[in-house]
Amino acid sequence: MKQRIYLLIIASFITLCVLSQVRKTKQPNKTKTTDIENTAADMASILYEEMLPNTQKVFIIDSIVVNYSQVLNAIPFPKDYGTILPYNKFFNTQKETDTYVYVNGFGNKCFYSEMSADSTYRLYTRDKLNDRQWGSPQLLEGFDIPFTEINYPYMTSDGATLYFAAKSEEGLGGYDIYVTSYDTETGKFLKAENIGLPFNSDKDDILYIEDDTDGIAWFASSRRQPEGKICIYTIALTSTRKNYNSDIDEKTLRNYAAITSIKDTWDSTESRQQAMSKVQKAISRATKEKTTKSSICFILNDDVEYTDLSNFSSEKNKQQYQSIIKKQKQLDNTNEQLEQLRSKYHHATKTEQNSLSSQILNAEKSQENLILSIKNEIKELRKSENEQIKK
């Protein structure tokens, strides 16, 4: 009996030793995972502190919170600046989920995110071959940053500046917004740059879109938002980048970088109201585009009037017509700006009038150049189309 008890005690001791050893062997894996997570968080925190002194000064006109799935519908950028569609809808497939395709305003080039052979998402482009067919995909090369995921492409109206959102070990966390430019000499894109604060955060920051005709832009961020929600910020574009003055205190700078209050970014209530009028026009125009057919009105000659973009004889002429429309919108905005400046001039002090005079002269010069350019393009377009009709 005593021998049996001794054997049970020895067996129990061996079991405890084995279990203890199993626990010891499992512990290093947990520690290793935690160390990796802490290292990534530390790197993101260091990057944030490096970016903080260069926080860009922005005028945030407005913001709106929507469901993540509705973010594309909530940004009213003009149709002639292009369209953004879900990958599945554009390619009519179930191959990809939650990736997007940008098609330029001319409808002849697209950029999109797709999983590559190494299981990472990369950006590709295709050119339109005809009305129904797209060419073979071309990988966008350059960037020089090892992105693990890349999505939400948008090409600006210059046709050379590309914005996109991506995840990287060198980012702030989640998606960050990046920008790059196309190098015509090498045929590749230059090294992508993180556009910094306040656009990016440790959450998902996506979809930077510009409307340089109206002078406004949008980007979306999930910072401080509940699951499934995202905030769309509308900002005023400026001709040059400006950072916040170094003499503001650190707490204020951090609030600007985190966008804790959009009201704090306004120069005045009046400037905000003027900016909101531009936003409302953009919303109105986008709503009208969605509710009306894609018809046009171009008087070719006494007998012929084009009512649809497909009436033009070539892709080049379609693009020229869209260029005319874009310049006409710029002219409308310039005319409105001139009217406001002249109104201010009559009620301004002598010192203010000196400053306004310079602004009025610049606007008048811009107005004159736009009118001349529009007239010349219309003349060229009519000549080209009439020559095609005679053939």
Image (cartoon, rainbow, N blue to C red):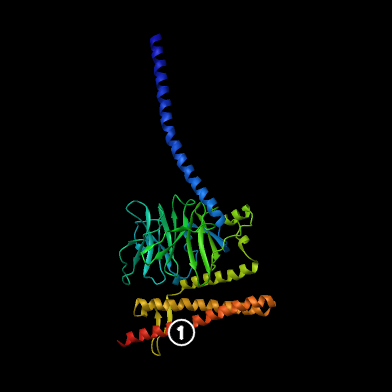
Label 1 is placed on what type of residue? Lys
Relative image position of residue 75 (x, y in whole percent): 50, 65
User: Seen from this angle, which residue lies furthest bottom?
Assistant: 302
Relative image position of residue 375 (x, y in whole percent): 46, 84
> Compared to 181, does 351 lie above or below?
below
Other residues around mark 1 within 10 Å, as few (<14) / some (14–19) / many (≥20)? few
Q: Is residue 348 visible?
A: no
Question: Would residue 177 appear left or right of 124 to someone viewing this image?
Answer: right
Q: Determine which quarter of the picture holds residue 297.
A: bottom left
User: Seen from this angle, which residue lies furthest top?
Assistant: 2
Q: Residue drawn at (33%, 62%), measured in percent from left and top?
A: 138
Q: Residue drawn at (50%, 45%), measured in percent from left and top?
A: 42
Kind of element beneath mark 1: helix
Say which quadrant the N terminus sits in.
top left
> Compared to 222, does 62 lie above or below?
below
User: Seen from this angle, which residue lies furthest right?
Assistant: 349
Question: Would residue 34 appear left or right of 345 to someone viewing this image?
Answer: left
Q: Is residue 333 visible?
A: yes
- Comparing 35 with 388, the one in front is 35
- Comparing 289 with 233, the one in front is 233
> Compared to 336, does 258 lie above or below?
above
> Compared to 273, does 361 lie above or below?
below
**Residue receiving disc 1:** 375
Q: How many numbered markers are drawn?
A: 1
Say which quadrant the C terminus sits in.
bottom left
Relative image position of residue 72 (x, y in whole percent): 47, 62
Relative image position of residue 157 (x, y in whole percent): 45, 70
Q: Determine which quarter of the picture holds residue 153.
A: bottom left
